Image (spheres, grey):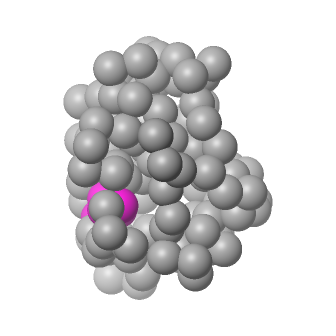
């Protein structure tokens, strides 16, 4: 792993107050800002901390992490230490936990299915 990934993840984990699950870390390195399906874009490791601070994730959803978005105002959320990681969508304007909508039980499976999004 390049040193910059180590630095990016160390800063993110310090801010979160918890480590990332190894499988999530691996996914984020592999995705490195790539798109999935028609709409989902995963944030690159260097962007994760800034995006989570900008969206005030720790204020609205303590213990959660946004790892991407759907290009239409919804954040892709996971619990950073949970394996397998359940994937949720939540509107950036209403990031309360009760507003989360599960889209997949496992991040890896969701990615393998090309990140399908619910019709709404």
Residue at (58% x, 81% y) in the render: 112
**From the viewer's perspective, is residue 70 above or below residue 18?**
below
- Quarter containing the N terminus: bottom left
Q: Is residue 81 above or below residue 14?
A: below
User: In this image, 29 relative to 79: left or right?
Assistant: left
Q: Is 43 included in the stretch rendered in magenta?
A: yes
Give the residue displayed 57% in from the left and 77% down from the top.
113
The reply to whether the magenta stretch includes residue 68 is: no
Q: Is residue 97 left or right of residue 82?
A: left
Q: Residue at x 32, y 69 (%)?
A: 38
- Is 30 on the left-hand or right-hand side of 79? left
Q: Is residue 39 left or right of residue 86?
A: left
**Relative image position of residue 78 (x, y in whole percent):** 58, 47
Give the magenta range: 40-45
- Residue 13 in sight here: no
Residue visible at 46% across and 40% down?
A: 120
Count of marks overlaid on the render:
0
Q: Nearer the viewer, residue 49 or 107?
A: 107
- Between 76 and 24, the residue placed more toward the observer is 76
Residue 47 spot, x, y in % from top left:
24, 54
- Can you name the residue that lies furthest to the front here? 120
Would you say residue 49 is visible in this rendering? yes
Residue 71, x across and y down, in percent: 25, 50
Q: Position of residue 14 (x, y in %)?
A: 47, 41
Foreground of the two, 60 or 14:
60
């Amino acid at each position: 792993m390049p040193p910059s990934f180590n630095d990016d993840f160390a800063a993110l984990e310090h801010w979160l107050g918890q480590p990332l699950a190894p499988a999530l870390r691996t996914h984020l390195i592999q995705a490195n800002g790539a798109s999935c399906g028609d709409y989902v874009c995963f944030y690159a490791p260097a962007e994760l901390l800034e995006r989570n601070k900008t969206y005030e994730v720790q204020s609205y959803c303590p213990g959660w992490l946004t790892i991407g978005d759907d290009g239409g105002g919804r954040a892709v959320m996971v619990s950073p230490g949970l394996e397998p990681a359940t994937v949720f969508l939540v509107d950036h304007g209403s990031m309360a936990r009760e507003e989360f909508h599960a889209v997949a039980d496992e991040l890896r499976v969701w990615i393998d299915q090309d990140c399908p999004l619910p019709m709404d």
